[in-house]
Image (spheres, rainbow, N blue to C red):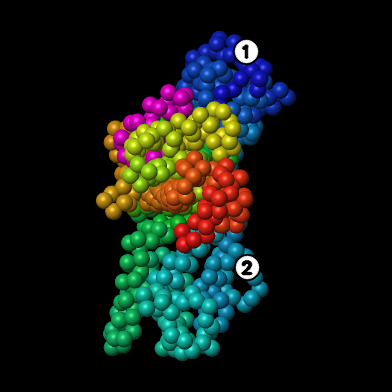
């Protein structure tokens, strides 16, 4: 979005002031007409950075556009280095809490691990402590960590999570699927005593409190003692439990002795808004998680840097390791600032494989879920659009995606379908159908060119609500050839929208995304691949349904011409007037004569044909 003097009459003054600004590093302080500070930023070169806000041709993101429209004046503070500018920026943001800077507010509460009362207690996550006789462990500051820990303990020790009551429901029904896939010990079979079950629960609680290593050591001692007493059945059970704990330790994300003090940070965004998630490891276990709604979306790299400075400027503790889901440009500068703030070395990295990548993915998924609550979309939809954005190199997640497909039978009844997806979901009110007008013989390239030309002619004419919105991404059901034909056409019309093709394999399934110079595989992006496949299947269904309907209608029109005096034009008149075969059957001979412009005898013959077996 470009800011104009209509939105901010102060632009000429601001541009003139900026033209005399120094090129030194420093901080700039934007103020509104009341003198209130609304934004604080840092710059390596003050003149270049501040000028970017007020240039007449500058294309701003919506959040920046809003901020610039309210700027009445600005101050600046020159520093000796970019690092000093970073320190000053953090201090000013903390002091003034400007409206358009990222202000971090989370929704922390307290959670507990509940061991229910009764002869066969259960392990559960609880948001509050109640007077119900249960044992409560906690409080913990992270409901996420509590839930993950309880799920992990129940899985490792095969504790029941069903709704059955024990011992009342012993042997009343078959064991459920969890028992058969070794996720539940099968208490419902009645084969476990109360003492044996409670010992297992105690071991699970110890596992949560002490971690896998301590649990393995204690269970190993018990196993050896049982073997010495020749209780080989108990020793075997303990051996299997130790194996389960060790196996869980290989892939679980709750307890990891190699993870000392670390923060894992990821940001998720849709076309307009963004959220951040921070997962904290302390002493080798997942200690806490915090989610932050960042409001309107900004430049991705700048947003991550701003979040890190804002987040750690208000925290006393800074871990030695910070993992990010995406790279940032000024990580060395931030490392230096965090080192001086904390008094120890801080390493910022972006893992690309292995266990650490799984942790950043976990943080990313949590950020996506948190964002989905705020924007009314599922986490999977948000993830799919983010993956698609990254794979295709788009500047931002597409809000509106349009996809086109051509359908025909040889050279007859050539049609096209246009489907629209908004934020990852079908927007059926904007679907459009096209009958091909200018192409006489089968030529998918020429048909697609006609459809896209008509679509954007309607966009400029603003004659139809369905064409009034400019898409953020165009997908064509076809390969590289379609992209090479359509892209120059659309650009010549003054439309700058990313265009890609959808390539199918020999089984008519989505295989890749075509560009003007090759193909992009989505096999490593499961959510994006699923979305693209869904869009391609939907546009194919929509186009072929219209083609079949049109072919059926044209065949019926051809049948009408069997009556002498009814040619193709009169048959079209009849179908245009009555629309459907059913309405034609309801019409009288007189009504048929009037609609087709024929005499009554021809109309009566037509009437008989319509009511025959045709």
Between label 1 and label 2, give the one nearer the viewer.
1
Does residue 246 lie above or below 508 as drawn?
Answer: below
Residue at 37 percent across and 35 percent down: it is 440
Whole-percent x, y for residue 312 in the image: 52, 40
Residue in the image at 52% along x and 33% along y: 470
Q: Give left or right: position of 536 versus 290.
A: left
> In the image, 298: left or right of 522?
right
Count of numbered circles on the image: 2
Query: Image quadrant of residue 331?
Result: top left
Q: Is residue 221 magenta?
A: no
User: Can you say whether 403 is above or below 530 in the image?
Assistant: above
* As drawn, 52 above or below 17: below
Mark 1–mark 2 CB contact (< 8 Å): no
The answer to whether any part of residue 328 appears in the image is: no
Which of these two is toward me, 333 or 577? Answer: 577
The residue lying at 45 percent from left, 76 percent from top is 159
Pointer 2: residues within 10 angstroms few (<14), some, or many (20+)?
some
Mark before the other along the chain sequence, 1 or 2: 1
Q: Residues within 10 Å of mark 1 (few under 14, many from 20)?
A: some
Span highlighted in magenta in the image: 474-499
Element type at mark 1: helix
Q: Nearer the viewer, residue 472 or 66?
A: 472
Residue where numbered disc 1 is placed: 12
The residue singled out by tag 2 in the image is 129
Instruction: Give the residue at the far front of this rendering.
Output: 601
Q: Residue furthest right?
A: 34
- SS for dot 2: loop
Q: x, y (%) of residue 37?
A: 66, 27
């Amino acid at each position: 979005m470009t800011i104009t003097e209509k939105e901010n009459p102060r632009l000429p003054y601001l541009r003139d002031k900026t033209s005399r600004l120094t090129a030194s590093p420093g901080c700039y302080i934007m103020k509104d007409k009341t003198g209130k500070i609304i934004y604080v930023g840092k710059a390596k070169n003050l003149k270049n950075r501040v000028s970017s806000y007020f240039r007449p041709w500058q294309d701003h993101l919506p959040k920046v556009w809003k901020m610039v429209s309210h700027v009445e004046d600005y101050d600046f503070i020159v520093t000796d280095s970019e690092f000093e500018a970073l320190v000053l920026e953090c201090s000013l943001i903390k002091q003034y809490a400007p409206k358009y800077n990222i202000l971090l507010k989370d929704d922390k509460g307290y959670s507990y691990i509940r061991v229910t009362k009764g002869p066969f207690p259960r392990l559960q996550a609880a948001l509050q402590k109640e007077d119900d006789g249960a044992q409560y462990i906690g409080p913990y500051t992270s409901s996420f960590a509590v839930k993950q820990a309880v799920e992990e303990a129940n899985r490792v020790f095969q504790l029941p999570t069903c709704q059955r009551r024990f011992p009342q429901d012993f042997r009343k029904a078959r064991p459920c699927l969890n028992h058969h896939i070794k996720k539940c010990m099968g208490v419902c079979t009645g084969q476990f005593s109360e003492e044996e079950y409670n010992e297992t629960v105690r071991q699970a609680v110890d596992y949560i409190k002490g971690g896998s290593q301590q649990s393995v050591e204690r269970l190993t001692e018990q196993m050896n003692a049982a073997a010495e007493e020749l209780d080989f059945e108990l020793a075997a059970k303990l051996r299997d439990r130790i194996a389960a704990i060790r196996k869980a330790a290989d892939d679980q994300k709750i307890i990891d002795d190699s993870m000392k003090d670390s923060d894992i940070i990821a940001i998720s965004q849709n076309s307009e808004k963004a959220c951040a998630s921070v997962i904290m490891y302390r002493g080798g276990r997942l200690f806490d998680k915090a989610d932050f709604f960042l409001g309107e979306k900004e430049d991705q790299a700048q947003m991550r840097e701003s979040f890190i400075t804002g987040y750690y400027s208000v925290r006393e503790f800074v871990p030695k390791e910070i993992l990010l889901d995406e790279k940032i440009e000024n990580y060395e500068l931030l490392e230096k600032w965090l080192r001086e703030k904390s008094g120890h070395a801080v390493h910022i990295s972006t893992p690309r494989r292995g266990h650490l990548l799984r942790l950043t993915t976990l943080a990313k998924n949590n950020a996506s879920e948190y964002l989905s609550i705020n924007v009314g979309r599922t986490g999977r939809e948000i993830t799919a659009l983010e993956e698609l954005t990254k794979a295709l190199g788009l500047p931002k997640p597409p809000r509106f995606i349009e996809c086109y497909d051509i359908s025909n039978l040889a050279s007859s009844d050539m049609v096209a379908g246009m489907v629209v997806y908004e934020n990852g979901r079908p927007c059926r009110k904007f679907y459009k159908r096209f009958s091909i007008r200018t192409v006489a013989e089968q030529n998918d390239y020429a048909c697609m060119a006609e459809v896209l030309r008509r679509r954007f002619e309607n966009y400029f004419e603003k004659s139809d609500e369905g064409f009034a919105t400019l898409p953020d991404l165009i997908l064509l059901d076809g390969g590289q050839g379609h992209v090479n034909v359509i892209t120059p056409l659309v650009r010549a019309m003054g439309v700058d929208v990313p265009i890609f093709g959808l390539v199918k394999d020999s089984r008519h399934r989505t295989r890749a995304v075509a560009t003007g110079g090759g193909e992009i595989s989505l096999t490593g992006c499961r959510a994006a691949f699923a979305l693209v496949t869904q869009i391609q299947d939907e546009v194919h269904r929509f186009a072929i349904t219209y083609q079949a309907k049109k072919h059926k209608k044209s065949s019926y029109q051809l049948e009408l011409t069997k009556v002498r005096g009814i040619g193709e034009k009169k048959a079209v008149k009849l179908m245009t007037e009555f629309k459907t075969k059913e309405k034609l059957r309801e019409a009288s001979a007189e009504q048929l004569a009037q609609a087709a412009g024929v005499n009554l005898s021809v109309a009566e013959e037509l009437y008989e044909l319509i009511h025959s077996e045709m």
